[in-house]
Image (spheres, rainbow, N blue to C red):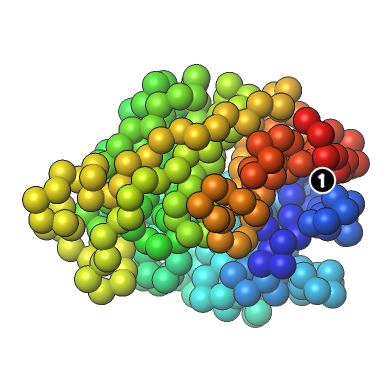
């Protein structure tokens, strides 16, 4: 994940690392006693949280690098909890196995908890009113926040849903799974109507991330590649600025759902990883019409982390899993 200031945060082995956006050097390495499986940054950039195997959660202050909290969020879950901050940094959502919890990030007090389907992925919409959860069965459930009530059930895929992501403008929901060749789908965030299936990856699609202007999508796959997709045409304005505003017809009367949500096309395939690409993220900032200024980070199963400068098409930097991070101006 990225901080708003551009620093990249990565989780892997028994460490959490903070990378400088210009030099590609590790500014800070936090060593933990267990495997660090997940991490997230608060929207205001103040805090970094990570989930450690067997349900532990740690929170660090990004500027001072000091640990401010740690606790056992989930007992005997055998995994690092999936995490996302809510309301800038006031609350932290954690999920493991079949349980979701909302905590005060300052006091670690439990605010709410609820049971749901076995969880494989999660994402909270930007306005923090709804949560999407992916499951082992292909089912995506949409929950209201902070109460956790189920609003909708979407049979998105036939198999595990490895990523669910709302676009920043809250017009779209992307889902990623192992349903080759239909592993990547786009849905209307208002109506949950299927808009488009994005084909190109071979095998599992493991992660996806929208650019901050919601016009680009980066996806990571089992085939060791990333794919860059671009939306041609804007989504319609939402009547109340929120997701799931209505369950009626397509937002633009007379247009089929695909055109109402814009048409997405693959514009580039990023090749360079030597193993399965398990994670990807756009750096903060709005890209220009040609993608100028956009940087994407990706992480592979072998521990390598790479940064890609999309305007140059070439790889901008690479970490080879040994804790070193190289910057380069060439291929």
Residue 272 seen by the camera: yes
Residue 2: image location, x then y, percent:
67, 58
The residue located at (84%, 75%) in the rendering is 64
Density class for disc 1 (Cα within 10 Å; few <14, some 14-19, many ≥20) is some
The residue located at (36%, 45%) in the rendering is 232
Q: In this view, does 316 lie to the left or right of 42?
A: right
Residue 89's image quarter?
Answer: bottom right
- Pick whichever, 246 or 79, lies toward us: 246
Q: Is residue 329 left or right of residue 271?
A: right
Q: In this figure, which residue is indicated by the disc labeled 1?
A: 14
The residue located at (50%, 34%) in the rendering is 267
Residue 265's image quarter?
Answer: top left
Q: Quadrant of the C terminus?
A: top right
Q: Is mark 1 on a helix, strand or loop?
A: loop
Q: Is residue 268 left or right of residue 6?
A: left
Residue 58's image quarter?
Answer: bottom right
Up-down: is 93 above or below 186?
Answer: below
Residue 158: image location, x then y, percent:
33, 28
Residue 99 seen by the camera: no
């Amino acid at each position: 994940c990225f901080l708003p200031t551009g620093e990249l945060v990565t989780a892997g082995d028994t460490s959490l690392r903070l990378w400088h956006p210009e030099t590609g050097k590790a500014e800070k390495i936090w060593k933990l006693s267990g495997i660090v499986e997940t991490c997230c940054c608060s929207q205001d950039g103040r805090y970094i949280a990570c989930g450690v195997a067997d349900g532990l959660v740690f929170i660090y202050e990004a500027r001072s690098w000091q640990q401010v909290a740690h606790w056992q969020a989930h007992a005997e879950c055998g995994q690092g909890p999936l995490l996302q901050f809510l309301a800038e940094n006031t609350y932290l959502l954690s999920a493991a196995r079949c349980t979701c919890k909302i905590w005060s990030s300052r006091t670690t007090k439990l605010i709410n908890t609820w049971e749901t389907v076995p969880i494989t992925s999660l994402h909270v919409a930007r306005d923090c009113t709804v949560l999407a959860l992916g499951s082992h069965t292909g089912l995506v459930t949409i929950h209201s926040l902070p109460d956790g009530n189920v609003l909708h059930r979407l049979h998105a895929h036939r198999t595990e849903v490895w990523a669910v992501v709302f676009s920043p403008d809250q017009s779209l929901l992307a889902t990623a799974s192992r349903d080759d060749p239909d592993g990547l789908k786009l849905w209307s965030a208002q109506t949950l109507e299927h808009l488009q299936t994005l084909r190109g990856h071979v095998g599992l699609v493991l992660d996806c991330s929208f650019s901050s202007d919601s016009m680009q999508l980066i996806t990571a796959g089992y085939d060791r590649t990333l794919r860059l997709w671009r939306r041609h045409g804007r989504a319609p304005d939402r009547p109340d600025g929120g997701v799931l505003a209505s369950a009626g017809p397509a937002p633009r009367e007379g247009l089929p759902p695909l055109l109402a949500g814009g048409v997405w096309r693959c514009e580039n395939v990023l090749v360079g990883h030597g193993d399965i690409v398990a994670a990807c993220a756009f750096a903060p900032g709005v890209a220009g019409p040609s993608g100028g200024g956009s940087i994407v980070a990706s992480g592979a199963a072998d521990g390598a982390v790479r940064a890609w400068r999309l305007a140059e098409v070439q790889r901008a930097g690479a970490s080879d899993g040994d804790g070193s991070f190289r910057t380069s101006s060439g291929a």
